[in-house]
Amino acid sequence: MTWLLRIIVSLMLSVLFPGSLAAQPLSRSVLVLDQSSVGLPFNTALAAAIRSVLNAGSAAPISFYAEYLDAKRFFGSDYEEEIVSFFKKKYHDRSIDVVVVVGPAALDFIKRWRAELWPNVPVVFAAVDEATAARVILPSNFTGVTMQLTLQDMVKVARVVAPNLKLASARVG
């Protein structure tokens, strides 16, 4: 996860602070929009790491917001319209400088609703597999890193989240 985090943070820093820090406003803001449910270990660790690294590398304060779409359990146009309405009300007086989307469902969501929610706000995506990213036509001001979903990579992530994880071997045939 360390290499992924470094790339994501580099992309976010280039979006948040494109020029001299002295020329930047006193406060910047990041919204992490995750396709998963709140409280999952990997997503919690990723959000905490992004916050920690950005705060450590910035002289200016950064406000962080996090939203979870819970896309595996809730979906459909009615749900999306309700959540968009909620986001409009919740963030109507907040300036968002960059949206970080985690996962392909969150990427699809922000592609459909960015013009209505946060037009022209840069989007940085993460945790999107290479095959999905290759099929997606990204609007301007979108950037991110893809990942290759191999079994070995999934086991590595599982061990980061659950260090004492014991994997059972399966016999085929």
Image (cartoon, helix red, strand yellow):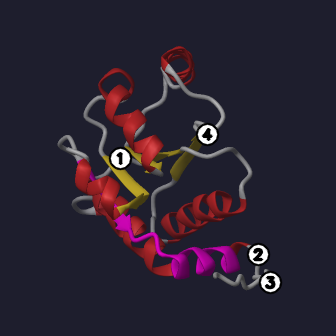
Name the residue rendered at 28%, 62% in the picture: 14
Is the residue under label 3 in contact with that under label 2 (CB below 8 Å)? no
- First in residue order: circle 1 vs circle 2: 1
Tell me how far mark 1 sits from mark 3, CA to CA: 48 Å
Q: Which amino acid does label 1 sit on?
A: Pro
Residues packed near mark 1 inside 10 Å, few (<14), some (14 to 19) or many (20 plus): few
- First in residue order: circle 4 vs circle 3: 4
Residue 120, quarter of picture = top left
Residues packed near mark 3 inside 10 Å, few (<14), some (14 to 19) or many (20 plus): few
The x, y position of residue 45, in whole percent, is 65, 65
Tell me how far mark 4 sits from mark 3, CA to CA: 26 Å
Secondary structure under badge 1?
loop
Segment tinted magenta in the rendering = 142-160
Name the residue rendered at 55%, 22% in the picture: 83
Asked whether the viewer can see residue 130, the reply is yes
- The reply to whether the magenta stretch includes residue 156 is yes
Asked whether the viewer can see residue 17, the reply is no
- First in residue order: circle 1 vs circle 4: 1
**Mark drawn on residue 162:** 2
From the viewer's perspective, is 26 left or right of 73? left
